[in-house]
Amino acid sequence: MLIEIARSQLLIIDVQERLAAAMHDKDAMVQNCGRLLEAARLAGVPVTISEQYPQGLGETVAPLQEKAEGVVRLAKAEFSCIRNEPIRAALRAHSRPHLILCGIEAHVCVLQTAIEAKADGYDVFVAIDATASRRPESREIAIHRLTAAGVQVVTTEMVVFEWIGSAASPHFKALSKLIR
């Protein structure tokens, strides 16, 4: 199944100051989350951002906040975003079944959200190069669990080019620049 732009929404999970600082390969993860955020905004794809216990873990990192003007950021205590009713309601309100996930941590909040979103009827895609864990082996185990659960593991570039669909797309020029 290809990711369809008109059926897509993006959920950025817990890319917060104190969490991001502890992640393996955090710079690449933040950069790719930013690319997805920019691509979504340019293409009119709805975006939701979750923040795990922000009073203790800080807000979404500055590079993403700068690109997220007007994007809903919702606090949560649950690891799975699907278990948080305001986040779940925000996702449902978009009525878009292709749910692209990225963020922190691959083996905890991203994994639990992906598996529960899949059970909730979403077609779930995890942009793995925009997803991190503190330890690389935790991320690798998460990949295995995600694929076993029927979640599609993709890259940022795959998402963007599937959204574009064709060099004739009105989004081609703006979105392809984000990948270069």
Image: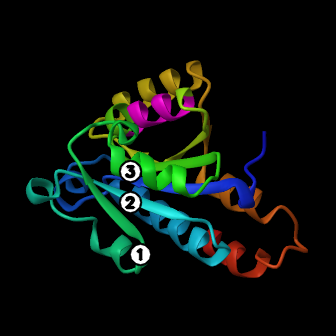
Q: Quadrant of residue 118?
A: top right
Please name the residue that numbered disc 3 is placed on: 87
Q: Quadrant of residue 43?
A: bottom right
Give the structural element (helix, strand or loop) at label 3: helix
State left or right for residue 166 relative to residue 90.
right
Q: Which residue is pictured at 34% across the width and 36% down the height?
A: 83
- Magenta-colored span: 110-118
Residues at circles 1 and 2 in contact by the CB criterion of under 8 Å: yes
Q: Which residue is pictured at 64% across the width and 52% down the height?
A: 96
Residues at circles 3 and 1 in contact by the CB criterion of under 8 Å: no
What is the three-letter code of the residue carrying label 1?
A: Ala
Question: In this orientation, which residue lies closer to the viewer: 76 or 140?
Answer: 76
108 to 19, vertically: above or below:
above
What is the three-letter code of the residue carrying label 3?
A: Ile
Q: Position of residue 103 (x, y in %)?
A: 39, 50
Please name the residue that numbered disc 2 is placed on: 49
Q: Position of residue 37 (x, y in %)?
A: 51, 68
Please name the residue that numbered disc 1 is placed on: 68
Q: Earlier in the sequence, mark 1 or mark 2?
A: 2
Q: Is 93 part of what is drawn in magenta?
A: no
Q: Position of residue 132 (x, y in %)?
A: 37, 45
145 to 132, vertically: above or below:
above
Q: Position of residue 31 (x, y in %)?
A: 44, 65
Q: Which residue is pictured at 42% across the width and 46% down the height?
A: 88
What is the three-letter code of the residue carrying label 2?
A: Ile
